[in-house]
Amino acid sequence: MKLNVGGADRVIRIVLGLALIGLTLTGNIGVWGWIGIVPLATGAIGWCPPYAMLGFNTCSMKNKT
């Protein structure tokens, strides 16, 4: 599995995911906030399935693993 999510993209995904989950836990938004698990996971792993299918890559590392 090659990394396809770069540094800034990963940070944004993790912050957004944590924010959505936090808002759900505090009751500010409904159960749809649990969708924050998706950007949190893709940011933590560094790989995004839609990016792979569409050929996008925001990872600037030369030697991706």
Image (tube, rainbow, N blue to C red):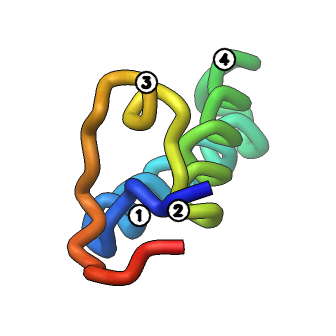
Name the residue at 61% across, 65% down: 44
Q: Earlier in the sequence, mark 4 or mark 1?
A: 1
Hey, what amino acid is under mark 2? Answer: Gly
Q: Which of marks 4 and 2 is nearer the N terminus?
A: 4
- Kindly report which numbered mark, 1 or 3, lies closer to the viewer in this rendering: 3
User: What is the C-alpha distance between the residues marked 4 and 1?
Assistant: 21 Å
Hey, what amino acid is under mark 4? Answer: Trp
User: What is the C-alpha distance between the residues marked 1 and 2?
Assistant: 7 Å
* Residue at numbered disc 1: 10
Of 31 and 45, nearer the camera is 45
Residue 28 percent location from the top left of the image = 61, 32
Answer with left or right where residue 26 lies relative to residue 57: right
Name the residue at 44% across, 53% down: 13
Hey, what amino acid is under mark 3? Answer: Met
Name the residue at 30% across, 59% down: 9
Q: Which of marks 1 and 2 is nearer the N terminus?
A: 1
Q: Which mark is residue 32?
A: 4
User: What is the C-alpha distance between the residues marked 3 and 2?
Assistant: 15 Å
Residue 27 percent location from the top left of the image = 72, 32
Q: What element carries label 4?
A: helix
In the displayed structure, would residue 18 be above or below residue 20?
Answer: below
Q: Which of marks 3 and 2 is nearer the N terminus?
A: 2
Determine whether label 4 and label 1 are within 8 Å by CB.
Answer: no
Residue 15 percent location from the top left of the image = 46, 61
Q: Earlier in the sequence, mark 1 or mark 3?
A: 1
* Residue at numbered disc 2: 46
Of 49 and 24, nearer the camera is 49
User: What is the C-alpha distance between the residues marked 4 and 2?
Assistant: 23 Å
Quarter of the figure that contains the C terminus: bottom right
